[in-house]
Amino acid sequence: MNIHSGTIQATDDPEVLGTEPIPARYYYDPEWFELERKAIWMRSWLNIGHVCELPEPGSFVRREIEFAHASLLIVRGKDGEIRALHNACTHRGTQLTSEPCGKQSKFSCPYHMWTFGTDGELISAPDFERFYTSKESCALKQVSVDVCGGLIFVSFEPQESLREFLGPMADMLEQVASSQATTFHEYVYEIDANWKLDYDNFQENYHLRFIHPNTAQSGIGGENPFGYPSSFSLYGKHRTQTIWTNPEGEFTPTTGLAFQKSMPRLQADGLLDLPHPREYLALFPNFFMLCSPGNNFLHYVMPLSAGKSRGVIRIYWKGEDETASTRFAREYGMAITRDIHSEDVNVIQAGQRGLSSGAIEHIHFMEKEILCRHLIKVVEEAVEAYRKEIA
Ligand code: FES
Ligand SMILES: [Fe+2]
């Protein structure tokens, strides 16, 4: 294991984060969740989209951010700037649109027709002379937004710039295939599980041989029956692992065909030589990405409550599906992702039910679940710092 920065001393010791069990209440206690909400969720930078969704001035996407009780319109303004505007009319709060995405030159409130520009400024309002305020002071409220490697991040109460928050991860994000993406496949799911329990499922390979004996064949077996990663690295709040592949593993005929069909396209797009092809890159608190150019997969988990979350899974691509082969390879990539995920969902929810019963006081992470332990350590540090601040 490598440690690159942050409060932990550089070491190869797998026990550097300690060995103690973890309080189970972190996964269901509403009071703990409320501390996380204020200490982590309101303050972190969170990926909520990609610049390819905002190709032109006026392009927008709407994102519901439940932990902040917010609806955000992420808009590319006439000036080309990307802004995150609260979807809340400054007259009396009415949400301006319920469309998930679109392209508009302005946003008109349905209630009394106050109309806002793509930069959030109030352009016009009927009979405005009779109000006791100015148009300048009635612009839509904004949330901090910034872009790294094509990925759009927002933060409600940023403590630092996006660059400072990401640290060395920023360079990696700029080097991988999603920085060049023009399109993506997506699916969104809701799950009855705490965000950490859901997210941790994708930070450990211990479960692969039991839950995915068929779908994860190329990642388990031989000298590495559990398919543990070949290395782990900690970068302050963030972390990476290097995915191990069984050199003797065999693709199923369909997987092999999809792999073969995707190769010429990746070659033509100049993606095959990108760095970090085997890296799994995890950004605190809720995001991870597989940097493989052929499967540039990312997943983020948003909390809805202590015991409920929403996950967003995307695979980013460069260029449209111009041939049947590309279409097949991409669709198959998403189909296999959904298959693997469908195998995970039931055990994650069963875990939540067990935890929420209050029957156990602690859970355990072993040596190879160090990424899960690291997430908990960073969460504990953030909550502790917040508690001191408000004491
Ligand atoms: S609430 Fe939007 S115009 Fe009145
Ligand atoms: Fe899994």
Image (cartoon, rainbow, N blue to C red):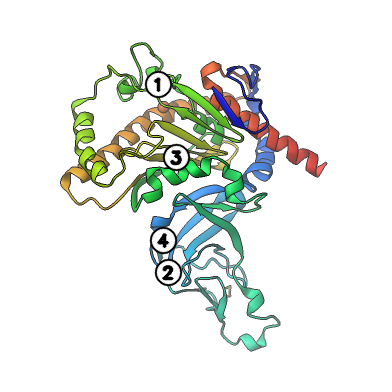
- Disc 3 designates what residue? 299
Residue type beneath disc 1 = Leu
Q: Is mark 3 within 8 Å of ligand 2?
A: no
- Disc 4 designates what residue? 54
- Disc 2 designates what residue? 57
Rounded to the nearest whole Å, what is the CA distance between mark 4 and mark 2? 8 Å
Tell which of 14 and 184 is nearer to you: 14
Rounded to the nearest whole Å, what is the CA distance between mark 1 and mark 3? 18 Å
On residue 208, the disc is 1
Rounded to the nearest whole Å, what is the CA distance between mark 2 and mark 1? 44 Å
Q: Is residue 321 above or below residue 282?
A: below
Q: Secondary structure at mark 3?
A: strand
Left or right, 385 with reference to 308: right
Closest to the camera, between mark 4 and mark 1, is 4
* In contact (CB < 8 Å): disc 3 and disc 4: no
Closest to the camera, between mark 3 and mark 4, is 4
Q: Earlier in the sequence, mark 4 or mark 1?
A: 4
Q: Residue at x 61, y 72 (%)?
A: 139
Residue 272, how many percent across, how many down? 30, 39
Q: Is residue 251 above or below residue 176?
A: above
